[in-house]
Image: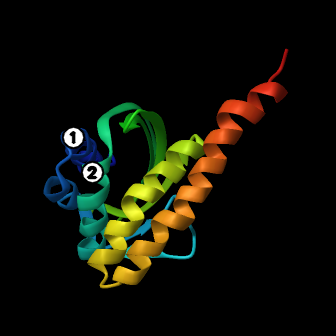
Amino acid sequence: MNQSYDAVALWRAAGEARDPAAAVAALSPDITLTSPITEQFTFQGRSQVRTLLDVALAAIDEITYTDQVAEGRTVALFYEAQVGATRLYEAQRLRLGADNLISDITLYVRPLPALTLLMTRLGPELARRNGQPGLARLIPLASGAMHSMAVTGEQRIMPRAAPR
């Protein structure tokens, strides 16, 4: 029997349309999503992932999926997007459950300044939605400093080490 990738097609279309409700329809009820920012937490279940998608899809513009590679129940997706004026590239490892819905997602974002900018935009709103207003005020300070260092490294330091 051939593996169905209908849920993956739905996930892709929902991401490009920035439609969190449609994206959640592609997910198993027991979905696990591992953050690209930290392995210290994951999002469990449709409700937590929906909250993340609400915030993330409001912050990320012009999502365009460029590649899909599949083997059995594992699919790798790649997209390009914008976070403000910063270009973002994301790889997603999706695993399909027995119901052919997406049961596990692991996200990878590059370059580092895009990831740190995303953190400054998503972190405060996620903290507010989790009832942590104090943390919502702290995150921009911590992530802003990391973002500044990442941009400085990307624009001023690393170009000096580039192959010649």
Residue 78 pos. (x, y %):
44, 38
Q: Earlier in the sequence, mark 1 or mark 2?
A: 1
Front residue of 99/142: it is 142
Could you say which disc has been placed on residue 57 in the image? 2
What residue do we see at 44% from left, 52% from top? 118
Residue type, label 1: Ala
Could you say which disc has been placed on residue 72 in the image? none
Residue under label 1: 13
* Label 2 crowd (10 A; few <14 / some 14-19 / many >=20): some
From the viewer's perspective, tell me whether residue 123 is left or right of residue 22: right
Front: mark 1 or 2: 2
Compared to residue 86, the image places residue 138 above or below, namely: below
What residue do we see at 27% from left, 76% from top? 129
Callout 2: helix, strand or loop?
helix
- In the picture, the quarter occupied by the C terminus is top right
Residue 142 pos. (x, y %):
56, 66
Residue type, label 2: Leu
